[in-house]
């Protein structure tokens, strides 16, 4: 048994398609793939990423997509132009925080962000397909597989899976990243960008920093083993 996973995409459709090609080469066209969220923001083709993943699922591809913190900005904005994510320090709005990547996401839908918020909101509501907003809003918060638990940011140690808060599943760092707890299944996550995928024993971080210009990570997980997929083949990811 094997399962594949792809880290934070951040609007890089070309990298996503290349990662799928590496997986196809390793596991065939029907390989199950989990995407750990952050489809949107920063990169140039957020709309294309959503289209590509929605089309693949509609065609019956065994693709699972879990929600990332960046995946709730656009649908929340469409329903409430003044919504601010409670997990953002300083209370910054998605449009006003230069590091969040709203400008690139809206541009991929043909919306110019350099205008008053009311106008941006009106244009976005007209430009973003309703099925895109529904897709993003309905993404599951995690995916539990016999080989691993897939989640965007991580889990709160000591809290049962069904009792985890959405804000933790999408945003947690402190309390999770330094934990040496045995979470039961291996936790495969993104959210905290590294130079490449890294195995910490109880968790596997697969956010290689595509949102910051680095390569998008694709991994394969077998029983008690994990490998990074490269153009040359599998590279073992050894636990610390």
Image (cartoon, rainbow, N blue to C red):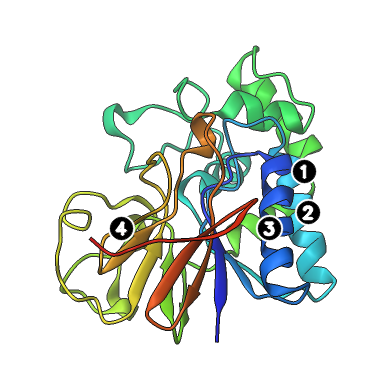
Badge 1 vs badge 2, beta-carbon distance below 8 Å = yes
Question: Which of these two is toward me, 117 or 56?
Answer: 56
User: Label 2 near label 4: C-beta < 8 Å?
Assistant: no
Q: Is residue 156 visible?
A: yes
Q: Of tags 3 and 2, which is closer to the observer?
A: 3
Task: Give the mark nearest the N terminus, 1 or 4.
Answer: 1
Task: Pick the residue in front: 68 or 223.
Answer: 223
Mark found first going from the N terminus, 3 or 1: 3
Estimate how packed mark 3 is, as few (under 14), some (14 to 19) or many (20 or more) residues with alpha carbons within 10 Å: many
Is residue 134 visible from the viewing direction of this image?
A: no
> Mark 1 — residue?
48
Q: Nearer the viewer, mark 4 or mark 2?
A: 2
In this rendering, position of residue 121 left or right of residue 154: right
Front position among marks 3 and 1: 3
**Alpha-carbon span between mark 4 and mark 2:** 28 Å
User: Badge 1 local density, few (<14 within 10 Å), some, or many (20+)?
Assistant: some
The residue indicated by pointer 4 is: 168
Which element type, helix, strand or loop, lies under badge 1? helix
Q: Is residue 145 left or right of residue 62?
A: left
Count residues near mark 4 (Cα–Cα under 10 Å), then give few for <14, some for 14-19, many for 20+. some
Q: Which residue is located at x 80 percent, y 36 percent?
A: 127
Earlier residue among tags 3 and 4:
3
Q: Which mark, by number, is residue 22?
A: 3
Label for residue 52?
A: 2
* Extreme residue toward the front, this view: 232
Report the Cα–Cα distance between label 3 and label 4.
31 Å
Residue at point 28%, 76% (across, down)? 163
């Amino acid at each position: 048994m094997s399962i594949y996973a792809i880290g934070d995409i951040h609007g890089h459709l070309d990298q996503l398609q290349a990662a799928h090609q590496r997986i196809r080469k390793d596991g065939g066209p029907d390989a199950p793939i989990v995407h750990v969220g952050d489809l949107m923001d920063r990169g140039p083709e957020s709309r294309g990423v959503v289209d590509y993943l929605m089309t693949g699922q509609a065609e019956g591809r065994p693709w699972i997509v879990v929600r990332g913190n960046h995946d709730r900005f656009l649908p929340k904005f469409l329903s409430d132009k003044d919504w601010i994510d409670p997990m953002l320090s300083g209370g910054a709005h998605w449009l006003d925080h230069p590091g969040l990547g709203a400008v690139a996401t809206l541009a991929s839908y043909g919306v110019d962000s350099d205008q008053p918020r009311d106008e941006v909101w009106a244009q976005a509501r007209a430009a973003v397909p309703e099925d895109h907003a529904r897709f993003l809003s309905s993404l599951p918060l995690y995916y539990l597989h016999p080989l691993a638990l897939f989640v965007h940011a991580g889990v709160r140690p000591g809290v049962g899976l069904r009792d985890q808060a959405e804000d933790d599943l999408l945003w947690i760092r402190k309390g999770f990243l330094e934990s040496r707890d045995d979470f039961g299944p291996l936790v495969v996550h993104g959210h905290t960008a590294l130079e490449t995928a890294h195995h910490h024993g109880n968790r596997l971080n697969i956010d290689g920093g595509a949102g910051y210009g680095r390569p998008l990570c694709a991994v394969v997980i077998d029983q008690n083993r994990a490998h990074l997929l490269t153009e040359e083949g599998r590279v073992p990811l050894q636990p610390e």
